[in-house]
Amino acid sequence: MLKKALLLSLFLLLNGCSFYNLEALGEVDKVQVVSKNASVSQYRAYFVRTQLKRIKNDQKYLYFYNKKKKDLAILLHKKNYYILHSLFHPEASKITIRAHKKTHYSAIEKVLQKRGYDLSSPEDAGARSFVALRRYKGIKTLLVEVKDYSALQIKYQKAIKSYNAASIQHIKTKLPHPLISGYYDRYYKRAKSDKAQAQLKIIAKKLQLDSPEEIQSNKDVKAALAQEIPEESDIDETEEEAEEMMEEEAPKVSALSFTYYAKKASYDELDSYLAESTTKESLSFNQFRQLERRHATLKEEKLLHEGSLEELISAYKVTKKPSYKKRILEQMKEVQK
């Protein structure tokens, strides 16, 4: 009987039925802890997006950071309220600010500043974020995922500041380059002794990060190659149009070679690398497309190994790939056991 019920549930899920929407309503608009250890904490939230209003410059969410509480939070605008959800402390009560049509965003920002929260970004809090439109159990939501690397960032900053590579040799978790490259560059330039520079180079190797000299050398090589690029009239128009369609983000320093990202980089590393605005500029059209294809492959592998049942079902509805269906059945059997 249980087996039949599970199979019926699977059939309804694969065919887009949302018979548990009422249950899902109690699970959205909440921040949940996905994983937590001494180095990295991951948080996830699904916010009902049909209720969201614009806050500033067509943005429907903004990040704020409280240095004293070490808390990254997200601000949303719903109906007559502005709501600040803590991302680093899911158990904390949300801050709700009542507003009306004549209420300006600047007034809301001042209220939050009095509470210790300043307009910020995940990177300022030692974190990386991922935001996307998703359906959660049939409900249209805004998915917000945040990885808090601040504890790991502090460990590396202490090692860099003290020129002591031994203190981080045991660390296995990888730290995204945008969260440490600028700090590393500052102290590398200050290092006067050969011993200090040697220690920083060991740390750079651990981080898989190029030294400022290597970065400058790469820039010089790219500048020399740029002189050999044909005139604009000779460039294929299709490639130009394809590149223009890609959205650009804030410039970040690229640290590793194309070969590494094409063959060895993990999904998270490649995902961060492709998100950098400097990546597209430093690669050829074919190289960029090659990395995009590998990114899609790694994303699928990660979903098959780590994805939840809901995520797998959503992916299967879109792609109809047998691999997703096989994994869904495997998870259903695990639930049955």
Image: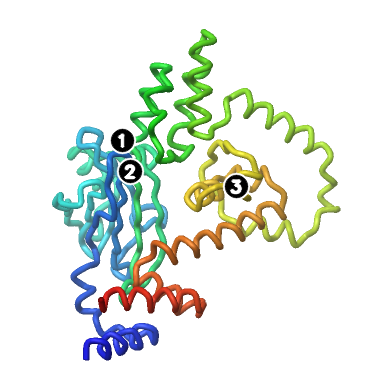
Q: Name the residue at 45% across, 40% down.
A: 176
Relative vertical location of residue 217 with respect to residue 328 in this rendering, above or below: above
Rounded to the nearest angstrom, the CA distance separating label 2 from label 3 is 23 Å
Disc on the earlier residue, 2 or 3: 2
Residue 28 shown left or right of residue 286 in the figure: left
What SS does tag 2 mark? Answer: loop
- The image quadrant of residue 335 is bottom left
Identify residue for label 2. 40
Identify residue for label 3. 261
Counting from the top left corner in percent of width and height, residue 250 is at 51, 43
What SS does tag 3 mark? Answer: helix
Tag 1: residue type?
A: Ala
Q: Which colour scheme appears in the figure?
A: rainbow
Relative vertical location of residue 57 with respect to residue 160 in this rendering, above or below: below
Relative vertical location of residue 162 with respect to residue 333 in this rendering, above or below: above
Tag 3: residue type?
A: Tyr
**For mark 2, does the 10 Å Cα neighbourhood hold few (<14), some (14 to 19), or many (20 or more) residues?**
some
